[in-house]
Each structure stands twice: as structure tokens, then as C-alpha cells.
Image: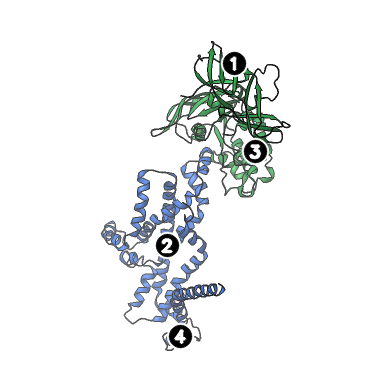
Chain colours: A blue, B green
Amino acid sequence: MRIDRLFIGLGKAVAVCMLLLWSLVPIAFVVISSFKPGREIFAVPPRHIFTPTLEHYAALWSRWGVFFDGLLNSAIITVGATVLAVVASTCAGYIYSRNSSRFLNGSVLFLIVVRLIPPIVITLPLFPIVNFLGINDTHGVLMVLYATFFVSLGTVLMRTFIDQIPRELDEAAQIDGAGRLTILRRVIVPLASPGILAVAVFVVVFAWNEFLFAFIFTGTNAKTAPLVISEMIGSIDGVDWGILFAASTVQLAPVLLFVVFMNRFLVAGLTAGATKG
Amino acid sequence: MTDLTLHNLTKNYGAVDVIRGVDLDIKSGEFVVFVGPSGCGKSTLLRMIAGLEDISGGDLTIGGRRCNDLEPRDRGIAMVFQSYALYPHMSVRQNMSFGLSLAGTPKAKINEDVMAAARILKLEPLLDRKPSQLSGGQRQRVAIGRAIVRQPSVFLFDEPLSNLDAALRMDMRMEIARLHKELGATMIYVTHDQVEAMTLADRIVVLEGGRVQQIGAPIDVYKSPANRFVAGFIGSPRMNFLPVSVTAATADTATVSAPSLAPITLPAKGFAAGQSAVLGLRPQYLHRQPAPGMSARVSGQVVLVERLGAETVVNLRTSDDQQVLAVLPQDAAFGAGETVDFHFEPAAAHLFAAEA
């Protein structure tokens, strides 16, 4: 019995280690390589002990100023898309939670189905429309697209969170003289804030890393950081891997910190409704 | 202080009728209790008065003003919910002042009103706490405080004590009675607990199946139930019902008999000889020893004796297999299986038509 338990424990530990190696090694490789002198990055055998250098970061700053413009664009678009998605998901989640009709119940399924369609299927028909409207290569178009892409999942998540807030609180507020918007603002939003943060985490991670929409709908003005990184790979004077790893590390750091900081809410979002019938 | 009138009020969800024509006049300052079993429509009726449920038909007037289509905030009511419904993210002070701040009341006035309500309910030391830091009784007091602060014409209570334990429930019951006296406001109170109904109400409204079964002062409803449902619902333990045959009848009396019951004549209207009926006997009106006037008796075999401390409840099985409960003094001594007679005054019994 004790040996069985020992083996199970050992098996679990090995599985966790494999999983950690699988997910952390590529990230560690990129981050560590960004501090290695150029010649040592792909040295065989790999050099684990080296003198760290910031030469690639300095080169990134001096030769790829456009990357930092891309970062700023990514930040603006991420913030905008997150605000839009959170506001729309919260309002829609509230309506779905507090109202019931055949149309609403049916449309929940539609919200989930829409999420299963490959993004490219939606993206290509949008291209002529975006061109016609003259909003190509603007921050706004990506904000709206990213927000739209996440409103379906955000609405379902927010509905689950708001379902857990007793309706009697709405009724008490109604008797206290609050209208629907006041109830949403003063009662529902403060109580559903873990859900709002969970939705925000999803949108931030998606919008910060997204490539496909940005590739199709931006050119120069609203070009995001992932696009600039992809340009580094296709650069005509050859790939400078040190700079590429430095750029990837800079791109990775904020979202990694954000996710670590908001980990609690991410888990809340992933498990929302898991214990409720 | 405001009168409130319900005129042929109805509520239906599609084809399902929940409230089927309720007429009621509530006078200013009156304490009215809606009582009835689960699903009788009492909470729905209260929520219709509050404006939380649409009214399907009829008229609701508060202070002479038709309120059917008014928003809850415009009806001059305040409501205390069963689950307290306190805003968990707000302090006690914020909970109590929420309605006034929405109405744009100046801060100084809000503070004054909140302090006055807190004084009445002894909530002053708790004003800066969150609801999660309060006990059940304290939360209920805050919920009542939130209602008082709004200075409504009508207070609505939806089973406000049912989440409290027995001791606290009694304290809060007395507190609500004291408040009614102090504020002199019109209060409508929903409960399924008849002790609350009997002790708090100026008038009880007994509901069943969405219809009013009887309206009256608690003691009148207890002593003269309008029908068998009310007789069975009001009073604890519930009234005993024995199937009887009417052997003779006049305009004001009926003579009835049953296998376990010597023939008795009691006041009753509308019965005819040969008819089946049901005799209602309150357990408290049955006595071991006959006293003057107790010319009637019911016999049976003791099957269970429950000693509740202050009183003893004896459970009899009659020869025609009916159950009869009797509430007797503490020291009543019985053995299981013993055959006994219980005596009662015929005038204390009630006669109801047998169910179809």
C-alpha cells in the first residue's frame, strides 16, 4: 500500500516536471539567450555559464525603434479592446442573467458557437468592409475586432458570475429608487468585479499577443509589436537572433507579469460556474 | 400614514392563476399579516404591492393613488426581505443611506436620518461594519433600518424572521411590534408562522390557492374560522377533524353523531338531517375531567403521549380510526393503550360541510 502510494507520488512529480520543462524551456531559452553574447546563443554544446550582456537590448533600441512604436500601439489597442470588451460583456451578462426569453436562451448557444468559428473565416470578409469604411490601419479597428472576438466568451462568463449575485439585491435597490443602470453600476459591478477582472485578463492576453488580425488590418500607423517581431525574422540583412530574443523578452515581460499578478482571477474565470448546477 | 386598497387584484403567469381576485382595505397605521401555506400566493401578493411583480388585473391604490403601473420607488413603500438583501460591499451606514443618496437628499439630512434609525434599532456601534461582520439578528435590524430611513407610508415584510433561530425570532418579533407602536406606520407582513401572525397582527388575511379565505382579528379567526381550511391552518396543534353524520337540524343548530362520539347538538347553520359533515375540535378545548357545560365527549385509545414541558399532548385513535389530539396540563398521566374519554363544550366545536 505504502509502495503504491510512493509510486503514484513519484509518477505525479515526474509528470509535473515534464509539463514544466515542456512549457518553461522555450521561454527560458528565449529570455536567457537575450542576455548571451551573440556567438554563444547557438553554441554547441550549449554554454550555461556566460557573462550576461545587454548588447542585444541596446541594438534593439538603436536599430529597431519601430518595435517600441509597436509596443505603444499594442498597449493602446490592448487597453481599448479590454475596456470595450469588459463594458459590453458586463452589460450583456447582466441582461442574460436577469432576463429570460426564448430568444435570449437560444442566443447563448449562438454566442458559444460563434467562438468556435476559425478567426480567419470572419477576418477575410471584413477586409473590404474595413477598407470601405476607411478605418484600415487604425487603433480603433483592432480595438473593436479584439473586443468583438471576446464579447461572446466574456458575456457567458459574466452571466455566470452575475447569476451568483442574489436577485433580491436588485429588488432591494429597485425599491431604494435605483434604475437598471444604477443597479448595474452601484450593486452588480462591485460584486462582479472578480468576473470583470477575469474577462479583462483573457482580453489583455489575447489582444497583446494577437497576430492575424493585426497582420491583415494594419500597415504602419497601428502596427503592433508581434508584427514588428515577425518583420525581424524576415529582415533582408539576415536574422539577428540576439535582437529577436531581446524583443521577444520585452514583448513577453508585461503580459507574463500581468498574468502572474492576476492569476487568481484567471482561475476564477476558467472555473466560473463549475460548482453550480 | 396611508390607506391601502386592493380591488379584485389578480396575477397570472400565462395560463396559471396565482392570485385570483383579492379585495382588501388596509387602514392607515394598521398591521396586517398575510398568512397561508407555501405556494398560497402571499409573497406574490406582497411583491405586487411592492411593484416587484406586475399586476395582471384589478386595482392597487396607496394613499388614494392608483399604483398599478408605478415604479417601486414611486409607491412610498419600503420592503424587508427574507434574506435581508443587504448590499455586501457597503457598510451598514451605506446600506441604510443608499436610498436617500439616490434620491439626492443632502448629506447632513441623510446622516441625521441614518443616526435616528440606528438609535431606534440600537445599531449605532455597527454603522461602519460590513454585513458579513454581523450576526443574523443584526443583519435583520439593518434591513429594517434601511426601510425606516426611507420614511415610507407602508412597510412590507416578506417572511423577515424565517432565517433566524427560535430565540432570536422571538426577540425580533417583539422588536417589530415595538417599532409598529413607535412609528405608527402601516405594515404588511407575510409569514407562514402563525405565532407571528397571531401576535403581531391587527388583522390576519388567510390565503389559500391565491384566494382570501378569511380576514379578521387574530382571535376572531381563531375562534370563528370561516371554513375548514382556516380552522386547520390557524391553531397549533391543528384542529381535530372527525367525520360525522347530521341526525337532526334546525335553522341554527345541528345534531351530529359518530362511532366515537355521543350525539351532540351544536350551533351550526345550513345543515340538513342525513347529511355528512366534519366536526372540528381544537385540541386545547378537550378536557380529561368534565366541567359544567361539557356535555359532549369523544373516546379513543391512547397511542402516544408527548410531554412538552408546560403541557402534554395526547394522541388518541378512535374506534372509527380517526386521530384526535388533546392538549392537557403538564401533570396529565396516561398509559399507552388506555381507553379514555375527553370532554368538551358543544359550543366550542365547529361544524363544516364534508368535502365533495
Residue A238 x, y percent position in the rendering: 34, 82
- Check the image and report above or below for A105 versus A36: above
Percent of width and height locating residue A139: 37, 61
Labels 1 and 4 touching (C-beta < 8 A): no
User: Residue A101: x and y, percent?
Assistant: 38, 43
Q: Position of residue A252 (x, y in %)?
A: 45, 71
CB atoms of marks 2 and 4 within 8 Å:
no
Marks 1 and 3 belong to one chain: yes
N-terminal label among 2 and 4: 4
Which residue is nearer to you in this view: B339 or B113? B339
**Quadrant in which residue B288 is drawn:** top right
**Disc assigned to residue A116:** none
Marks 3 and 2: in contact by CB < 8 Å?
A: no
Q: CA distance from mark 2 to mark 1?
A: 85 Å
Residue type at the position of mark 2: Thr
Q: CA distance from mark 2 to mark 3?
A: 54 Å
The label nearer to you, 1 versus 4, is 1
Q: Secondary structure at mark 3?
A: helix
Q: Nearer the viewer, mark 1 or mark 3?
A: 1
Residue to which mark 1 is pinned: B266
* Distance (Cα) linking label 4 and label 3: 77 Å
Q: Secondary structure at mark 4?
A: loop
Q: Are marks 4 and 3 on the same chain?
A: no
How packed is label 1: few (under 14 Cα within 10 Å), some, or many (20 or more)?
A: many
Residue annotated with mark 3: B169
- How far, Cα to Cα, is label 2 from label 4? 33 Å
**Are the residues tagged 1 and 3 within 8 Å (C-beta)?**
no
| Furthest residue toward right | B331
Instruction: Tell me, yes or no, whether dots 2 and 3 are on the same chain.
Output: no
Residue occupying image coordinates x 64% and y 49%: B133
Number of the label disc, if any, that sits on residue A37: 4
Any part of residue A17 in sight: yes
